[in-house]
Amino acid sequence: MEPRERTQAARDRVPRIDPYGFERPEDFDYAAYEEFFSTYLVILTRRAIKWSKLLKGSSSVQKSMTVKRYIRKGVPLEHRARVWMGVSGAQAQMDRNPGYYHQLLQGERNDSLEEAIRTDMNRTFPDNVKFRKSADPCLQKTLYNVLLAYGHHNQGVGYCQGMNFIAGYLILITKSEEESFWLLDALVGRILPENILRAWKLVHEHHRQASRELQGQAAGTGVTWAFSPLHDHEASFLELTNFYCFPF
């Protein structure tokens, strides 16, 4: 098969939208991605089986050297919400405070907080189909609620630029407003350093350019991680922050 035909065939088979709802860039190498994924799928499947066995029959995620080692290798998408909630302490906080999240949403109005959050709504993941106003449902409302609740919860921080991207990823993973709120509280309130929001904003601004450069380098050197199917630039970052929850 000619290279052009191979590329077109791969483009027809690989979804234009990735599992998180992000549109693949115009210069995305579908053929290289498909070739890599055919091998990487074996690894992902093996990891998923191990995680399923580890979590089977347990209502909570217990910290252990095994869990720590598994997290270092990456948590499968289907288990991420549960694992992140457990190891970060967010699940325990949510269980101890039933109804608290909804109380925050019904709290006293804060016009400056609400305006700051609204300003960033359309700027959050414009290349993600789930955050567009035309989406049904549109995750902008969910994101707004999570950020508003956190601003009321942690008035010392309120809302800072960059929090919308962190909360947005949490929503995509958990598919739950309340779980996203408690994970955001764990990350911003207890786990991440004080200047992380500024650093996260810089990371996001350079994300597309860096991704394309890394993909090009990988294609030329045989390095394959840049073709990860799970948008793991960001997902690995969040898993790494949860890794620091372990006191051993």
Image: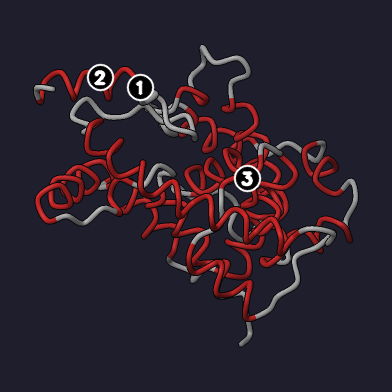
Q: Please provide percent x and percent y for residue 54.
A: 71, 64
Give the CA separation, mark 1 to mark 3: 22 Å
Q: Quadrant of the C terminus?
A: bottom right
* Residue at (19, 51) in percent of width and height: 214
Please tell me whether residue 28 is drawn above or below residue 163 in the rendered image. Answer: above
* Contact? badges 3 and 2 (CB < 8 Å): no
Q: CA distance from mark 1 to mark 2?
A: 6 Å
Viewer-nearest residue: 245 or 104: 245
Q: Are marks 1 and 2 in contact (CB under 8 Å)?
A: yes
Mark 1 — residue?
A: 13
- Bin the neighbour count of mark 2 within 10 Å (Cα to Cα): few under 14, some 14-19, many 20 and up: some
Q: Quadrant of residue 112?
A: top right
Residue under label 2, please give it.
9
Residue 178: quadrant of the picture: top right
For the point 88% across and 56% down, the residue is: 97
Q: Residue at image x 61%, y 40%?
A: 171
Residue 114 placement (x, y as % from top left): 60, 35
In the rendered image, which residue does mark 3 sit on?
78
Q: Position of residue 213 (x, y in %)?
A: 15, 47
Q: Earlier in the sequence, mark 1 or mark 3?
A: 1
> Is disc 1 in contact with disc 3, using a CB cutoff of under 8 Å?
no
Vertical relation: 225 (above or below) 244: above
